[in-house]
Image: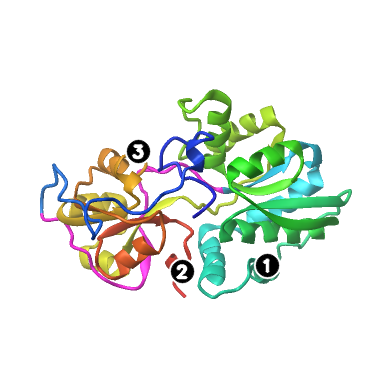
């Protein structure tokens, strides 16, 4: 289970953000609910296939969860930030997908995958030397965060620092450690971190400050960080956020590449949406698809949060569309 709770799944306050999904629903052994009230039309039955694609979120349902370095402000000198920004400049979502595939599917260690990426993308070229010293890069308890931490290690080593990567756990553990300076750098996600700091300061019902626009989100994030002694570098183009996936075979059969096309062509009884049980209530999941896109589905299958159950459901033809993370290695084409 990933260390960070997506905006799709409940309040992003300090307590709610730590909640873990705990298995499938209780609607029967299949985990598939009865047809949803209000579904009409034929819909689009699942189509099995191995290759998965993410449908374009063309109406911007999801907020901007771009990868961004978070730094304890006491060590955030210009050379250190510039080194971390070199990593951000090298990363887009397709490259992050390939990094995750290298670790999760090809079984490379995060360290090896990061070193190969840094070499292929000239990450250390032109990095200026900073004042040096010891830096601990904290990483969450999931592979992507560890790989990003290793990339930060490589860049900061080139800037003259003595760096080690330490797996810390979830945000509730590493964010206070970052504030206190027990760790100095953490790879973060703009919208999720903005709302974490927002609700930590202002309560679980605080008005959201993140946005589908990355500049708006980062401006709000930096304002929150200034209050607690955390500085943020430049956001990468790479995003790791909720994405709605279908098989390539499904997309080809029904002619859908965007969520708008899915709603227009596939609203109806044959369409099966798969995801964690919370998806049925959370505003960035099923209700968001209904409100923003006008999608109605025939049934919902309670599976997991972007994990093997959802991906297997897509590949075996048990569900039409499923919620997985946009940087998942399953989206890799080679």
- Report the front residue among 52 and 109: 109
Give the residue drawn at x 41%, y 60%.
Answer: 307
User: Please, is residue 217 above or below residue 161 in the view?
Assistant: above
Question: Are dots 2 and 1 in contact, CB under 8 Å?
Answer: no
Give the residue drawn at x 57%, y 40%.
Answer: 193
Task: Specify whether residue 61 is in view.
Answer: yes
Q: Which residue is mark 2?
A: 332
- Which secondary structure, mark 2? loop
Looking at marks 2 and 3 on the same chain, the residue that comes earlier in the sequence is marked by 3
Q: Which residue is mark 1?
A: 111
- Report the front residue among 292 and 7: 7
Label 2 and label 3: CA atoms lie apart by 28 Å
- Which secondary structure, mark 1? helix
- Which secondary structure, mark 3? loop
The label number, if any, that marks residue 283 in the structure image: 3
CA neighbours of label 1 inside 10 A, class few (<14), some (14 to 19), many (20+): some
**In this picture, which residue range is highlighted in magenta?**
42-66
- Report the front residue among 146 and 40: 146
Give the residue drawn at x 64%, y 55%.
Answer: 89
Looking at marks 3 and 1 on the same chain, the residue that comes earlier in the sequence is marked by 1
User: Please, is residue 69 above or below residue 53 in the view?
Assistant: above
């Amino acid at each position: 289970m990933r260390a960070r709770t997506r905006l799709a799944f409940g309040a992003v306050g300090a307590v709610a953000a730590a909640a873990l999904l705990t298995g499938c629903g209780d609607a029967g052994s299949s985990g598939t609910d009865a047809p949803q009230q209000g579904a009409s039309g034929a819909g689009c039955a699942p189509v099995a296939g191995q290759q998965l694609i993410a449908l374009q979120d063309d109406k911007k349902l999801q907020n901007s969860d771009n990868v961004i370095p978070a730094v304890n402000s006491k060590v955030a000198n210009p050379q250190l930030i510039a080194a971390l920004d070199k990593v951000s400049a090298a990363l887009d979502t397709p490259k992050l997908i390939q990094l995750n595939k290298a670790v999760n599917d090809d079984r490379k260690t995060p360290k090896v995958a990061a070193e190969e990426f840094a070499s292929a993308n000239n990450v250390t070229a032109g990095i200026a030397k900073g004042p040096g010293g010891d830096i601990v890069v904290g990483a969450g308890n999931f592979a992507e965060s560890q790989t990003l931490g290793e990339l930060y290690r490589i860049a900061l080593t080139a800037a003259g620092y003595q760096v080690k990567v330490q797996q810390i756990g979830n945000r509730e553990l590493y964010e206070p450690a970052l504030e206190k300076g027990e760790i100095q750098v953490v790879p973060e996600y703009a919208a999720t971190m903005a709302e974490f700091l927002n609700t930590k300061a202002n309560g679980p019902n605080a008005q959201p400050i993140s946005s589908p626009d990355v500049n708006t989100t980062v401006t709000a994030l930096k304002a929150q960080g200034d209050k607690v002694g955390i500085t943020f570098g430049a956001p990468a183009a790479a995003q790791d956020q909720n994405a709605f996936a279908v098989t390539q075979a499904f997309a080809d059969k029904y002619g859908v590449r965007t969520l708008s096309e899915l709603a227009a062509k596939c609203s109806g009884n044959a369409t099966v949406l798969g995801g964690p049980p919370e998806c049925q209530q959370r505003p960035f999941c099923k209700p968001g698809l209904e409100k923003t896109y006008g999608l109605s589905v025939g049934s919902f299958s309670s599976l997991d949060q972007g994990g093997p159950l959802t991906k297997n459901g897509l590949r075996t033809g048990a569900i039409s569309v499923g919620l997985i993370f946009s940087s998942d290695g399953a989206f890799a084409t080679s």
